[in-house]
Amino acid sequence: MLSLAPDASAQRAARALAGDKAWCEVGLSADDQLPPTVWGLCQGSGHQPYQTCVDLTEPAYRCSCPSRKFPCKHTLAMLLRWAAGGVPEAPAPAWVRNWQAARAERVTRAVAREEQARKGGEGNGRAVSEKAAVRRATRVAAGLQELDRWLADQVRGGLAAATKLGYDHWDAMAARLIDAQAPGAARLVRNLAGYLGDPERLLAELGLLRLLTAGFPRLDSLPAELAGTLRLRVGLPVSAEEVRASPPVRDRWQVLGVRDELEDNLMVRRVWLRGASTGRPALVLSFAGPGQVFVTDLVLGTELDADLCFYPEHLRVLIAQRHAPAAPITAVGTARPVAAAMREYAEALAADPWLERWPMVLGGVVPARVGDQWCLTDGGDGVPLDPAAGAPWRLVAAAAGRPVTVTGEWTAAGLRPLSVWLGDRLVAL
Amino acid sequence: MTWPDVLATALVGTARSGGDAEALLDAAAAHALRRRAGVPLVPGAQPPPPAPPDDVPMVGPAAAARAGDLLAVDAVTRNAGPVRGAGRLELLAEWLAAAAAAGRRLPPELVPALLDAGRRHPQLRPLIGPVAGPLAGWLAAQRADWSYASPAAPVPASPASTAATEPAAVTDRPAASDRADRGQSDVDEDQVWELGGIARRVDYLSRLRRRDPDRARQLLEQVWHAEPPEDRAALLSTFQTGLSTADDTMLERALDDRRRQVREVALDLLAQLPGSGYANRMAARAAACVDLSAEGRIGINPPAGCDRAMRRDGIAPRPPAGVGARAWWLEEILARTPLAVWPEPRAFLGRRIADEWAGTVRRGLARAAAVQRDTRWAAALVDQLTADVLSRGQPDDRLLLEALYDALPPEELAERATAALRGGLARAAAVGVQHVLDLCPRPWPPAVADAVIAALEEQLGRRTAPWRLAELCELAALRLPPALAPRVAALAGRLRSARPDDPGLAIVERFAATLKYRHEMLEELV
């Protein structure tokens, strides 16, 4: 519950408030017109008590307090009370019903808007955006053509010479790709500067970039899925409407890994999901600028019954609809032995050659050390761990030498462990 | 074209080696994908044998989360808690002790962080075994800088005498000590003595002192002259463990060392050795200066000079500023004389003494009582000095008082703290009540707790500047019984409503918050 808190001070405040006598009235209501909602009146420093309510299916929050933190301490405290069983069932007061009604209306309106956009045709807007899209596609094509020539130049002059050039050499090309509105390709080029000490990796990345530049002019002749992936990797935008238009996949999605990384002054949070019955991996990406906090409610070790819509590369998703509040995971059934997990990865790589991170759920593995290299073994050869992730002592201690289920991100440098399932709880690593 | 060929061609460049650049890139892409899909796994991975099972139940999720916060090393979590720095360590120690008392263990994933904390803070080490269980030893066997927690690490023979100088080894729940294992490690360790760095050799020697002090002394005697002076000092300091009159000769020899550091170590040790030749020499010097022949009086005949022999025995020839030379020498002699040569402390201190010497004699005796950790002398002197400080208040005397407190048993300190606080915070502070409270048993006994809260309340009622309030509140926050949290919260609440702009309010509120934190922490562990 507390991992929903935007920061540590809100957590502390919420803990303090949860057991407090400031609550005049609390209740849990659910009926046909009303999804399960916890609500309460909390006497704060103001004259009127604050009205706080939480829709448990999303969760979505509202509180009448002036706090700029979201969710605020009142919301968190009420959830804590609810989690501790301190909220009785009660009929919902009018203000709660009004809130839920307003929300329902907003959703209906949004759906209607989308419908409208999909039917499209009549409005001027669509024509304008189509023209813009064509213009952008032309610029991107020109940028990638230049990249193609540049790639060939690197190989013509020799990588040995290219690695001696400064960062400017790589950044200049990346900047030109940004100008050409191909930010995906630009990022890949900028990353090249990190492999100057590793010519094998550098050449491999150049080859993968060449796949992009060679494939882009032939987009129309490629299979639709591969074309979609390629567009995405180049950096052409995919609108949320387009994603929502794809057929949703319903499952109990288990949150098996959360990882925050700093990329270009932006915190990127990757939340890895696995469908308990489909076994499908999914990725929820969210971003936070400097000083901002993530507005995510996906908590490691919980599962949510929801419809997800996949992006064209079949990994990143949008949550289209939730059917029930998140609940703690009781079993991780999607674990695979090492060999099967590697096969799965190879298949994913065949569908998306530019795949950088792939979520793995390895079953029955034990951490072991071979020289300085840590790996996970299920009796046979071990899956190497990414040395940059540091020595996995937390994992070693949690496993205590016994086979466990480990989740992680597979990258070209090795596996980065994210969590370990100990039979009754999922532990973050 | 194989991958090595592709790589070689690319490194040189197609301009020189010939061939088509685009085709080469395409080949590189194909190879890269094939290589990525066929992940190079690590052969020959041998996991260690599993850790012994631990059927002690784990602490609940709330307690586990709190332990995680207390063990966290990142700045954000560290600063989120109610206390920082050394206080945080004290909270962690309290958590560990409470978990052990509740018969619960730490979640396994937190044990590495705990072992790291123990590596940096030896005072935590004895608390690790009971909450980490056999997992600690299992992990320690896999990482050198956790070796202090391995079950093979020797347990000190007499914790009372060695605890002050030696970090106690972690005692594991199941008593694990294997004879064969011990023999094996001795063989390896002889090499440590011959070849190891100074830190490891000191470690080796002090462990040997615990088992066999004579053997350790012989080892050091053999190499004494070959060692560099700094190492001589470091190695000699291990004699603190298992010190006895058998070490007398060796220490006398060290007194003639050219290096001052070595002589100082020897002097410190000799001062703790009542039967030594050094003690006898000092006793003779003291007897010459102090005349006890007259009934009810003490006659003082201070030394006329500081000769070579006195300097060899560590008496500083030059007095500090403002102290007469002869008085200084007298104080130095008394400070190094075994207290056993004097009559009963109360009887001795009850005798009349010339005013000009009273202070000197008392200071000398107080220093001796502090060094020799003589409880009876310390108690008698504290009484006298307390009266003196309250009437005159010399800062020197307060330092002396604080040194004497160290020699008193905790229960007696608790009584003294209570008595001192009854006179108000200002008077108590003058006799160093802070230091007494710091030494009191934890958590404070009810009498001390009541006295502290009463004194704080009185101080806050007075509306004076929050003099020394912060320090006392910080200490009380960590040492008061946590069950008093509501009382302190009420105190803070009263202050807030009575005087919201009081400069002491923030201090008292933090005090209340910390105590509440501890209260919740212990509730979670029940």
Image (tube, coloured by chain):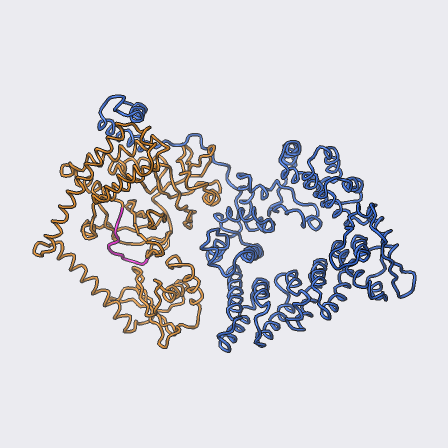
Q: Quadrant of the N terminus of chain B?
A: top left
Residue B225: x %, y % from top left: 73, 34
Count numbered badges in the picture. Answer: 0
Residue B281: x %, y % from top left: 85, 48
Near-viewer residue (B179 or A45): A45
The kind of secondary structure the magenta stretch mainly shows is strand
Tell me which residue sits at (50%, 68%) in the image: B506
As drawn, which residue projects farthest toward the top?
B17
The answer to which image quadrant residue B459 occupies is bottom right
Near-viewer residue (B49 or B386): B386
- A92 relative position to B269: left or right: left
On screen, residue B9 above or below B448: above
Residue B270: x %, y % from top left: 77, 47
Residue A61: x %, y % from top left: 31, 64
Tell me which residue sits at (53%, 46%) in the image: B116
On screen, residue A33 above or below A242: below
Write the start and end of the magenta stretch as one range.
A316-325
Q: Is residue A308 magenta?
A: no
Q: Is residue A319 magenta?
A: yes
- B91 relative position to B360: left or right: left
Tell me which residue sits at (56%, 46%) in the image: B119
Near-viewer residue (B341 or B172): B341
Q: Colour of chain B?
A: blue
Q: Which chain is orange?
A: A
- The reply to whether residue B324 is in sight is yes
